[in-house]
Image (tube, grey):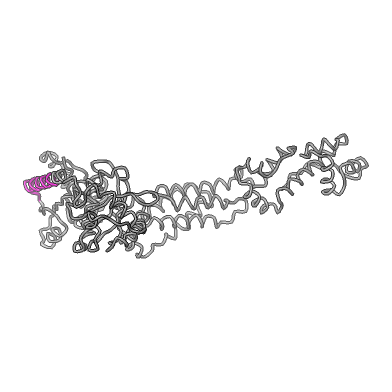
Amino acid sequence: MYRLLIADDEESIREGVADFVRRSCPGWEIAALARDGREALALARETLPDAVLTDIAMPHMNGLDFLESLSSILPEAKLLVLSGYDQFEYAVQALRIGVGDYLLKPLDTAKLIAALDRFAAELDAQALRWTQAETLRAGVQRSSALELQGFFSAALLGGELPAVSAACGALIREESSCCCVLCEGLDDRSGLLERLLEQRLYGAAQTVLLRVGAPLRQAIVVCVPRRQEPGMFLMLSHTLTSIAVFCRRTEGISCRFFVGCVAHSPEKLSVSYQQCLQALNYAFPEQAPPVTSYEDVLASKLLPCPELPVQLARDIPAAVWCENRTAFAQNCAALFQWFAQQEICDAVFLRMCVLRLCYAILEKPQPEYSMSYYEFTNFQTEIMNSASLDELRTCFENFVSLWWLRRAEDSPARRTLTERVNEVIEAHLSDIGFSLNDVAGTLFISPNYLRQLFKQETGQTFTEYLTARRMRHARLLLGNPDARIYDVAEQTGYADSRYFSVCFKKFYHMTPSEYQLSLAQGEAVPPQEEILP
């Protein structure tokens, strides 16, 4: 059964034609109904109909513009116009687009049935032709496949080209034009891709499938005689789009293709491969068409750069600073809606817009809190590596959530490094072998990095800080007149009481015994326990 999409701004006509097709055309089902060209285009992307019936005069996007846009999404769809305008220029434009029939309102149902029957017969014939396609690849024997894969792998990566046998020489002769195509989504279905290429190219081009790069990606090297180069891209775009539609419609697989420019010799195929990579990284998958060429990317990058709306650039940071979660959620939704309305496909631009907002949020002075350099660089990396609009939005929302968390007074994450280190020291003051490595292990920070950060935050080395902490604790213990020097030494991490006395005198300019004596004579005041800043 084939699927028909109907687009007309008049509900009575739209619903009437749909009811008639359901009752009178058993080989057809209704894929979707659309009120205008814009809605029809979105529904066509979603439902992948085999045929489209559309009015011409519709709001937002007229029927002819819709059909022109549809050709890059469903190049093999059968097109039918139903119009109230019997104008020659409309008919000529419709024929140029590839419309199979032009029907006038009021609808002659017999002509509609005839048109749909003809479309069904053409689709049946096409399916039969594909199933009867030869399984051997045109001009290339299976025994030569590995040799060609090795040759073209070297060519794509810019390596030294190996010699090839005479059997493979015809494919890579100088009078051939080649280009690289990268495929995403069919990595484990190379047999399916090979079969679909054979069916749809009808010998118009020769292809070699291989896996190349790091990470490994499925690549296609397409070769045609130089005389056929002018029509190479349109033929290739039509074929690859047809394959993507087939895979999604019948196999439930989403795949995309990225096409580099033509190379006139194998030595220049590495440039075509690099262009494929640029096309692959240009747009988020959900925004990219089935086929993206390097020239598409280049043309898009030359368009004027849109500016983020001033109101959004102002209101989003303000909502974060005020911790107005409702306002932030509304403005964040408006931001991504603006991305969609502008039809911005450049993923790098979208990521940079979000990153600029993060910078703007951090510009607000917050003396009571700060987000660490490490935390921010982590978010920056996540944002620039986001693989979809949803993932980008989630990264931004997580960034704001952490900003709010760091601002909260009761957040344990607000503790400084010194406070965290001091907590560990308190638990190990009496451990004789205690060192910076023990603190690093407890806090899961590398010793060298901890040493550097600690010196930046306190102005002291860890050893200086630990010694001061032990001496102050020893001074507290010595406030007890019955305390014995060797016991105090052990309780502050010193195995040798004599060495402890040397350290104490160096720190307080008197020995532990002298200090106890001064306390007994009233010459010193017993200290309170101190917590180092």
Nearest the eye: 299 or 512? 512
Identify the image quadrant of residue 345. bottom left
Q: Which residues are magenta?
A: 106-126
Would you say 411 lies left or right of 126 here?
Answer: right
- The answer to whether residue 501 is magenta is no
Q: Quadrant of the N terminus?
A: top left
Nearest the eye: 245 or 119? 245
Q: Position of residue 145 (x, y in %)?
A: 26, 49
Would you say 28 lies left or right of 485 here?
Answer: left
* Extreme residue toward the left, this view: 110
Q: Look at 51% across and 57% down and name the residue there.
A: 360
Residue 342 appears anywhere in the view: no
> Overall secondary structure of the magenta stretch?
helix
Number of disc labels: 0
Q: Position of residue 198 (x, y in %)?
A: 20, 49
Would you say 114 lies left or right of 136 here?
Answer: left
Q: Position of residue 459 (x, y in %)?
A: 70, 54
Residue 287 appears anywhere in the view: yes
Nearest the eye: 200 or 107? 200
Q: Look at 54% across and 55% down and name the residue there.
A: 362
Q: Position of residue 108 (x, y in %)?
A: 7, 48
- The answer to whether residue 110 is magenta is yes
